[in-house]
Amino acid sequence: MAQNTHSMARTLDLAYIAAGTALLAVCSWICIPMTVQFTMQTFAVFFLLMLLGGKRGTASILVYILLGAAGVPVFSKFTGGLGVLFDKTGGYILGFMFTGLIYWAAERLSGGRLWVKIAALTAGLAVCYAFGTAWFMVVYTKAHGTTALNVVLGWCVYPFILPDLGKLVLAVLLARRVSPYLKTGKE
C-alpha cells in the first residue's frame, strides 16, 4: 500500500511538472506590446513557484529550458534551440533557474512564510537580471564591441522592472486563490 501511495505521489509530481512546463511555454508565447515588448514568462515562473512549490516549480523551469535547448519551440516567438540560449538574451532564460533555486531554498528554510516567498521571488528576479545582463554584455561585446553597463541596463532591465513586479504581484495573488483547489502536496 505504501509503495502504491509513493507511486501515485510520483505520478502527481510528474503531472504537475509537465503542466507547469506547458504553462511556462504558453506564457512565453504571449507577447504584450508596449513601449518595449515583453512576454509573460516571468509571470509563469513566479506563479509556478508559488503554486507548485520550489521543487516542482524549479523542475518545471528546468524541463522548459531543456526542451527549448533541444529545439522545441517553447521560447518567445515560438523559437527554440541552443542558438536562442547562447544568443544575447539567453542568459535571462537561464536566469529563471536561479529564481527557482533561490525560491526553493527560501521556502525550505522559512517554513513557507508568505513574506519570505515574495522576498525570494524578488531576489530571484534580481539575480536573473544580473545573470542575464552579464550574459548579454559578454555576447554583445563579442559581436559588436564593448558597450556601457548603463546602456545594457536601459535595453534589458529598466523597462522590465515595473512590468515584472506587476507580474509578481499578480502571480502571488492568483496562486493564493488557486492553491486551495489543487492538491499539490507541496512542501
Image (spheres, grey):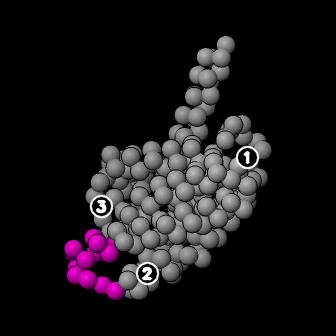
Residue 160 in sight: yes
Q: Secondary structure at mark 2?
A: helix
In the drawing, what numbered circle is on residue 153?
2
> Residue 39, percent across and down?
51, 65
Under mark 1, the amino acid is Ser
Q: With respect to residue 172, does 111 lie above or below?
A: above
Identify residue for label 1.
179
Q: At 41% across and 58% down in the image, what residue appears?
A: 94
Query: In this view of the protein, which residue sits in the foreground, 80 or 116?
Result: 116
In the drawing, what numbered circle is on residue 57?
none
Label 1 with label 2: CB-CB less than 8 Å: no
Question: Residue reaching furthest top?
Answer: 1
For the record, the magenta segment spans: 136-148
Residue 40 in sight: no
Query: In this view of the protein, which residue sits in the foreground, 123 or 57?
Result: 123
Q: Quadrant of residue 52?
A: top right
Q: Quadrant of residue 169?
A: bottom right
Task: Using residue 75 as the reference point, say whether residue 140 is left or right of it.
Answer: left
Q: Secondary structure at mark 1?
A: helix
Query: In this view of the protein, which residue sits in the foreground, 2 or 57?
Result: 2
Q: At 73% across and 55% down in the image, what residue appears?
A: 113
> Residue 46, percent across and down?
60, 58
Of the image marks 1 and 3, the number of the one nearer the N terminus: 3
Asked if residue 147 is among those painted magenta in the image, a careful observer would answer yes
Q: Residues within 10 Å of mark 3 (few under 14, many from 20)?
A: some
Q: At 61% across and 17% down in the image, what residue appears?
A: 3
Task: Using residue 49 as the reference point, say whether residue 93 is left or right of it.
Answer: left
**What secondary structure prevails in the magenta region?**
helix
Q: Residues within 10 Å of mark 2 (few under 14, many from 20)?
A: some
Query: In this view of the protein, which residue sits in the foreground, 90 or 37?
Result: 90
In the drawing, what numbered circle is on residue 86?
3
Task: Using residue 96 as the reference point, say whether residue 10 is left or right of it.
Answer: right
